Amino acid sequence: MACLASHRSGESSNQRVLPTWWPSKRGPRVLSEKAAEPAVETQLAASHISKYFGGNKVLDDVSLNVRKGEVVSIIGPSGAGKSTFLRCINFLEVPYEGSVSLDTLTISVVNGKLRNSGKELAALRRKVGMVFQSFNLFPHLTAQRNITLPQERVLGRSRREAEQRALNLLRRVGLEAKAHSYPSQCSGGQQQRVAIARALALDPQVMLFDEPTSALDPEVGTEVLAVMRQLAEEGMTMLVVTHEMRFAQNVSDRVLVMVDGRIIEEGSPDIVLMAPQQERTRQFLKAVLRE
Ligand code: ADP
Ligand code: MG
Protein backbone atom coordinates (compact mmCIF):
# COMPACT_ATOMS: atom_id res chain seq x y z
CA MET A 1 0.00 0.00 0.00
CA ALA A 2 1.42 3.35 -1.05
CA CYS A 3 0.73 5.20 2.19
CA LEU A 4 2.36 2.50 4.29
CA ALA A 5 5.50 2.50 2.24
CA SER A 6 5.83 6.29 2.31
CA HIS A 7 5.15 6.39 6.04
CA ARG A 8 7.79 3.78 6.79
CA SER A 9 10.47 5.26 4.58
CA GLY A 10 9.63 8.81 5.74
CA GLU A 11 10.06 7.78 9.31
CA SER A 12 13.36 5.97 9.01
CA SER A 13 14.96 8.75 6.98
CA ASN A 14 13.70 11.38 9.42
CA GLN A 15 14.97 9.54 12.45
CA ARG A 16 18.53 9.75 11.20
CA VAL A 17 18.50 13.54 11.29
CA LEU A 18 16.34 14.11 14.36
CA PRO A 19 17.86 15.13 17.68
CA THR A 20 18.26 12.42 20.29
CA TRP A 21 15.36 13.75 22.36
CA TRP A 22 12.88 13.32 19.52
CA PRO A 23 9.95 11.17 20.71
CA SER A 24 11.13 7.63 20.34
CA LYS A 25 9.29 4.38 20.55
CA ARG A 26 8.81 2.98 24.01
CA GLY A 27 11.01 -0.08 24.24
CA PRO A 28 9.43 -3.42 23.39
CA ARG A 29 10.35 -4.63 26.88
CA VAL A 30 8.04 -2.05 28.44
CA LEU A 31 5.24 -2.88 26.00
CA SER A 32 5.50 -6.60 26.63
CA GLU A 33 5.59 -6.07 30.39
CA LYS A 34 2.42 -4.02 30.04
CA ALA A 35 0.79 -6.67 27.91
CA ALA A 36 1.60 -9.27 30.55
CA GLU A 37 -0.07 -7.33 33.36
CA PRO A 38 -2.95 -9.44 34.62
CA ALA A 39 -5.39 -6.71 35.66
CA VAL A 40 -6.19 -3.85 33.31
CA GLU A 41 -7.07 -0.85 35.39
CA THR A 42 -9.35 1.63 33.67
CA GLN A 43 -8.60 5.12 34.90
CA LEU A 44 -10.81 7.21 32.67
CA ALA A 45 -14.02 6.07 31.03
CA ALA A 46 -16.14 8.17 28.70
CA SER A 47 -19.38 6.37 27.98
CA HIS A 48 -21.95 6.99 25.25
CA ILE A 49 -21.12 10.66 24.80
CA SER A 50 -23.39 12.53 22.39
CA LYS A 51 -23.24 16.24 21.67
CA TYR A 52 -25.20 18.59 19.42
CA PHE A 53 -24.44 22.11 18.26
CA GLY A 54 -27.81 23.44 17.18
CA GLY A 55 -29.30 20.64 15.12
CA ASN A 56 -25.84 19.24 14.29
CA LYS A 57 -24.86 16.00 15.98
CA VAL A 58 -21.12 16.43 16.40
CA LEU A 59 -20.53 13.46 18.75
CA ASP A 60 -22.51 10.32 18.17
CA ASP A 61 -22.41 7.85 21.06
CA VAL A 62 -18.65 7.94 21.61
CA SER A 63 -17.18 5.65 24.28
CA LEU A 64 -13.58 5.24 25.37
CA ASN A 65 -11.81 3.51 28.25
CA VAL A 66 -8.28 4.60 29.05
CA ARG A 67 -6.00 2.53 31.28
CA LYS A 68 -3.80 4.03 33.93
CA GLY A 69 -0.58 5.18 32.27
CA GLU A 70 -1.94 4.65 28.78
CA VAL A 71 -1.24 7.17 26.01
CA VAL A 72 -4.07 7.36 23.48
CA SER A 73 -3.75 9.48 20.34
CA ILE A 74 -6.86 10.68 18.55
CA ILE A 75 -6.46 11.46 14.87
CA GLY A 76 -8.95 12.39 12.20
CA PRO A 77 -9.97 15.12 9.77
CA SER A 78 -10.82 18.66 10.80
CA GLY A 79 -14.40 18.99 12.05
CA ALA A 80 -14.57 15.32 13.13
CA GLY A 81 -15.38 16.27 16.73
CA LYS A 82 -11.98 15.58 18.31
CA SER A 83 -11.76 18.86 20.26
CA THR A 84 -15.40 18.64 21.29
CA PHE A 85 -14.81 15.14 22.62
CA LEU A 86 -11.84 16.28 24.75
CA ARG A 87 -13.85 19.25 26.00
CA CYS A 88 -16.73 16.96 26.95
CA ILE A 89 -14.36 14.81 29.02
CA ASN A 90 -13.61 17.69 31.39
CA PHE A 91 -17.03 19.29 30.87
CA LEU A 92 -15.76 22.46 29.24
CA GLU A 93 -18.63 21.43 26.97
CA VAL A 94 -21.58 19.68 28.55
CA PRO A 95 -22.57 16.72 26.40
CA TYR A 96 -26.20 16.07 25.63
CA GLU A 97 -25.91 12.52 26.83
CA GLY A 98 -23.29 10.32 28.44
CA SER A 99 -21.02 9.96 31.44
CA VAL A 100 -17.38 10.38 32.37
CA SER A 101 -15.78 8.35 35.16
CA LEU A 102 -12.43 9.01 36.74
CA ASP A 103 -11.46 6.76 39.63
CA THR A 104 -14.51 6.56 41.87
CA LEU A 105 -16.20 9.67 40.51
CA THR A 106 -18.82 9.51 37.74
CA ILE A 107 -20.43 12.56 36.18
CA SER A 108 -23.50 11.87 34.05
CA VAL A 109 -25.66 13.91 31.74
CA VAL A 110 -29.12 12.93 30.61
CA ASN A 111 -30.99 15.03 28.03
CA GLY A 112 -28.46 17.81 28.46
CA LYS A 113 -28.96 17.95 32.24
CA LEU A 114 -26.10 17.30 34.64
CA ARG A 115 -26.91 14.68 37.26
CA ASN A 116 -24.16 15.76 39.65
CA SER A 117 -23.44 18.66 41.93
CA GLY A 118 -21.14 21.53 41.01
CA LYS A 119 -18.79 20.26 43.70
CA GLU A 120 -18.48 16.86 42.02
CA LEU A 121 -17.97 18.51 38.65
CA ALA A 122 -15.20 20.69 40.10
CA ALA A 123 -13.59 17.59 41.62
CA LEU A 124 -13.48 15.89 38.21
CA ARG A 125 -12.11 18.98 36.49
CA ARG A 126 -9.35 19.28 39.08
CA LYS A 127 -8.14 15.81 38.19
CA VAL A 128 -8.06 16.42 34.44
CA GLY A 129 -5.35 18.73 33.09
CA MET A 130 -5.82 20.25 29.66
CA VAL A 131 -3.38 21.78 27.20
CA PHE A 132 -4.78 23.75 24.26
CA GLN A 133 -3.46 24.56 20.83
CA SER A 134 -3.34 28.26 21.73
CA PHE A 135 -1.55 28.00 25.14
CA ASN A 136 -4.08 30.30 26.92
CA LEU A 137 -1.52 31.85 29.31
CA PHE A 138 -2.31 35.12 31.07
CA PRO A 139 -0.23 37.68 29.12
CA HIS A 140 0.14 40.04 32.09
CA LEU A 141 1.59 37.37 34.39
CA THR A 142 5.09 35.86 34.40
CA ALA A 143 5.57 32.19 33.55
CA GLN A 144 5.96 31.42 37.23
CA ARG A 145 2.86 33.36 38.24
CA ASN A 146 0.83 31.65 35.50
CA ILE A 147 1.73 28.41 37.25
CA THR A 148 1.32 29.52 40.87
CA LEU A 149 -2.03 31.32 40.55
CA PRO A 150 -4.18 28.25 39.73
CA GLN A 151 -2.50 26.30 42.54
CA GLU A 152 -3.45 28.99 45.04
CA ARG A 153 -6.98 29.44 43.65
CA VAL A 154 -7.90 25.82 42.97
CA LEU A 155 -5.89 23.86 45.54
CA GLY A 156 -5.48 26.54 48.22
CA ARG A 157 -1.70 26.16 48.28
CA SER A 158 0.38 28.85 49.94
CA ARG A 159 2.32 31.20 47.65
CA ARG A 160 5.57 29.69 48.89
CA GLU A 161 4.51 26.11 48.22
CA ALA A 162 3.07 27.03 44.82
CA GLU A 163 6.32 28.79 43.87
CA GLN A 164 8.38 25.80 44.85
CA ARG A 165 6.21 23.53 42.75
CA ALA A 166 6.28 25.99 39.83
CA LEU A 167 10.07 26.13 39.88
CA ASN A 168 10.35 22.34 39.99
CA LEU A 169 7.99 22.04 37.03
CA LEU A 170 9.72 24.78 35.06
CA ARG A 171 12.97 22.90 35.60
CA ARG A 172 11.30 19.70 34.41
CA VAL A 173 10.17 21.31 31.15
CA GLY A 174 13.58 22.96 30.68
CA LEU A 175 12.45 26.53 31.42
CA GLU A 176 13.80 27.43 34.82
CA ALA A 177 15.49 30.48 33.29
CA LYS A 178 12.14 31.77 32.03
CA ALA A 179 10.41 31.83 35.44
CA HIS A 180 10.23 35.62 35.51
CA SER A 181 9.57 36.16 31.81
CA TYR A 182 6.18 37.15 30.44
CA PRO A 183 4.54 35.04 27.72
CA SER A 184 5.43 37.68 25.10
CA GLN A 185 9.10 37.14 25.99
CA CYS A 186 8.83 33.39 25.35
CA SER A 187 8.71 31.53 22.04
CA GLY A 188 5.55 29.62 21.16
CA GLY A 189 7.20 26.35 22.16
CA GLN A 190 8.29 27.83 25.49
CA GLN A 191 4.78 29.16 26.13
CA GLN A 192 3.32 25.74 25.45
CA ARG A 193 5.79 24.16 27.86
CA VAL A 194 4.74 26.71 30.51
CA ALA A 195 1.12 25.73 29.79
CA ILE A 196 2.01 22.06 30.33
CA ALA A 197 3.75 22.94 33.60
CA ARG A 198 0.68 24.95 34.65
CA ALA A 199 -1.58 21.95 34.05
CA LEU A 200 0.80 19.57 35.87
CA ALA A 201 0.98 21.89 38.89
CA LEU A 202 -2.56 20.87 39.80
CA ASP A 203 -1.48 17.20 40.06
CA PRO A 204 -3.87 15.86 37.42
CA GLN A 205 -4.51 12.14 37.06
CA VAL A 206 -5.11 12.49 33.34
CA MET A 207 -3.77 14.99 30.80
CA LEU A 208 -5.70 16.01 27.70
CA PHE A 209 -3.78 17.62 24.85
CA ASP A 210 -5.63 19.26 21.95
CA GLU A 211 -3.22 19.61 19.03
CA PRO A 212 -0.54 21.12 21.30
CA THR A 213 1.98 21.63 18.50
CA SER A 214 -0.17 22.67 15.57
CA ALA A 215 0.36 26.40 16.19
CA LEU A 216 4.14 25.92 16.32
CA ASP A 217 6.93 25.67 13.77
CA PRO A 218 7.92 22.02 13.42
CA GLU A 219 11.31 22.62 14.98
CA VAL A 220 9.81 24.30 18.04
CA GLY A 221 7.09 21.66 18.21
CA THR A 222 9.70 19.00 18.85
CA GLU A 223 10.58 20.62 22.22
CA VAL A 224 6.95 20.27 23.24
CA LEU A 225 6.71 16.72 21.94
CA ALA A 226 9.83 15.82 23.89
CA VAL A 227 8.23 17.04 27.12
CA MET A 228 5.10 15.03 26.28
CA ARG A 229 7.15 11.94 25.58
CA GLN A 230 8.88 12.33 28.93
CA LEU A 231 5.50 12.61 30.67
CA ALA A 232 4.33 9.47 28.90
CA GLU A 233 7.44 7.61 30.00
CA GLU A 234 6.85 8.72 33.57
CA GLY A 235 3.47 6.98 33.42
CA MET A 236 1.04 9.86 32.94
CA THR A 237 -2.31 8.86 31.48
CA MET A 238 -2.67 10.95 28.33
CA LEU A 239 -5.27 11.59 25.66
CA VAL A 240 -3.72 13.46 22.76
CA VAL A 241 -5.46 14.92 19.73
CA THR A 242 -2.68 15.27 17.22
CA HIS A 243 -1.67 15.63 13.60
CA GLU A 244 1.84 14.51 14.51
CA MET A 245 1.81 11.03 13.06
CA ARG A 246 5.28 10.28 14.35
CA PHE A 247 4.15 11.08 17.89
CA ALA A 248 1.06 8.90 17.42
CA GLN A 249 3.26 6.13 16.05
CA ASN A 250 6.14 6.33 18.48
CA VAL A 251 4.69 7.39 21.80
CA SER A 252 1.08 6.21 21.96
CA ASP A 253 -0.11 2.82 23.10
CA ARG A 254 -3.28 3.16 21.06
CA VAL A 255 -4.58 5.29 18.21
CA LEU A 256 -8.23 6.20 17.63
CA VAL A 257 -9.55 7.53 14.36
CA MET A 258 -12.48 9.90 14.65
CA VAL A 259 -14.63 10.84 11.66
CA ASP A 260 -18.03 12.57 11.68
CA GLY A 261 -18.41 12.36 15.45
CA ARG A 262 -17.65 8.65 15.74
CA ILE A 263 -14.61 6.49 16.42
CA ILE A 264 -14.36 4.51 13.21
CA GLU A 265 -11.20 2.59 14.01
CA GLU A 266 -8.86 1.97 16.91
CA GLY A 267 -5.92 -0.20 17.77
CA SER A 268 -2.18 -0.26 18.21
CA PRO A 269 -0.31 2.44 16.25
CA ASP A 270 1.33 -0.20 14.08
CA ILE A 271 -2.01 -1.54 12.94
CA VAL A 272 -4.00 1.70 12.63
CA LEU A 273 -1.24 3.73 10.98
CA MET A 274 0.44 0.99 8.96
CA ALA A 275 -2.42 -1.34 8.08
CA PRO A 276 -5.72 0.46 8.66
CA GLN A 277 -8.90 -1.51 8.17
CA GLN A 278 -11.11 1.37 7.10
CA GLU A 279 -10.91 3.04 3.70
CA ARG A 280 -11.68 6.39 5.39
CA THR A 281 -8.62 5.98 7.62
CA ARG A 282 -6.44 5.20 4.59
CA GLN A 283 -7.74 8.33 2.86
CA PHE A 284 -7.02 10.47 5.92
CA LEU A 285 -3.51 9.08 6.39
CA LYS A 286 -2.68 9.63 2.73
CA ALA A 287 -3.79 13.26 3.00
CA VAL A 288 -1.81 13.84 6.21
CA LEU A 289 1.35 12.21 4.89
CA ARG A 290 1.20 14.38 1.75
CA GLU A 291 1.21 17.59 3.88
P1 ADP B 1 -12.12 18.84 15.33
O1 ADP B 1 -11.47 19.19 16.60
O2 ADP B 1 -12.10 17.38 15.02
O3 ADP B 1 -11.61 19.64 14.17
P2 ADP B 1 -14.43 20.09 16.52
O4 ADP B 1 -14.72 19.29 17.71
O5 ADP B 1 -13.74 21.39 16.72
O6 ADP B 1 -13.67 19.19 15.44
O7 ADP B 1 -15.80 20.39 15.75
C1 ADP B 1 -16.75 19.41 15.43
C2 ADP B 1 -17.93 20.08 14.75
O8 ADP B 1 -18.60 20.89 15.69
C3 ADP B 1 -17.55 20.97 13.59
O9 ADP B 1 -18.54 20.87 12.60
C4 ADP B 1 -17.55 22.35 14.21
O10 ADP B 1 -17.85 23.33 13.25
C5 ADP B 1 -18.65 22.24 15.24
N1 ADP B 1 -18.45 23.10 16.40
C6 ADP B 1 -17.39 23.04 17.25
N2 ADP B 1 -17.54 23.94 18.25
C7 ADP B 1 -18.71 24.58 18.02
C8 ADP B 1 -19.43 25.61 18.69
N3 ADP B 1 -18.96 26.16 19.82
N4 ADP B 1 -20.60 26.01 18.15
C9 ADP B 1 -21.11 25.45 17.02
N5 ADP B 1 -20.48 24.47 16.35
C10 ADP B 1 -19.30 24.03 16.83
MG1 MG C 1 -9.90 20.49 16.99
Image: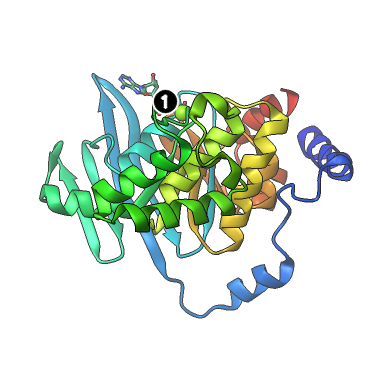
Label 1 crowd bin: few (<14), some (14–19), many (20+), radius 10 Å: few
At x 27%, y 41%, the residue is 91
- With respect to residue 116, does 281 lie above or below? above
Q: Is residue 51 above or below residue 152?
A: above
Q: Looking at this view, name the residue that lies furthest to the top.
A: 54
28 horizontally vs 252: left or right = right
Task: Give the SS element for disc 1.
Answer: loop
Name the kind of residue labelled 1 in the image. Answer: Pro
Q: Is residue 272 left or right of residue 84?
A: right
Number of marks in the rendered image = 1
Ligand 2 closer than 8 Å to label 1 CB: no
Residue reaching furthest to the bottom: 38
Q: Quadrant of the N terminus?
A: top right
Q: Nearer the viewer, residue 81 or 176?
A: 176
Residue 284 location, x and y as percent?
A: 62, 29
Residue drawn at point x = 61 percent, y = 35 percent: 281
Where residue 261 appears, as percent x and y from the top left, is 40, 32
Residue at coordinates 51% horizontally, 44% vertically from top-left? 240
Dividing the picture into quadrants, the one containing residue 35 is bottom right
- The type of colouring in the image is rainbow
Which quarter of the figure has residue 7? top right
The front one of 24 and 281 is: 24
Q: Quadrant of the C terminus?
A: top right
Q: Residue at x 32, y 52 (%)?
A: 159
* Quadrant of the displayed image that contains ligand 1: top left
Q: Is residue 50 above or below residue 252?
A: above
Q: Quadrant of residue 246?
A: top right
- Residue 256 placement (x, y as % from top left): 53, 45
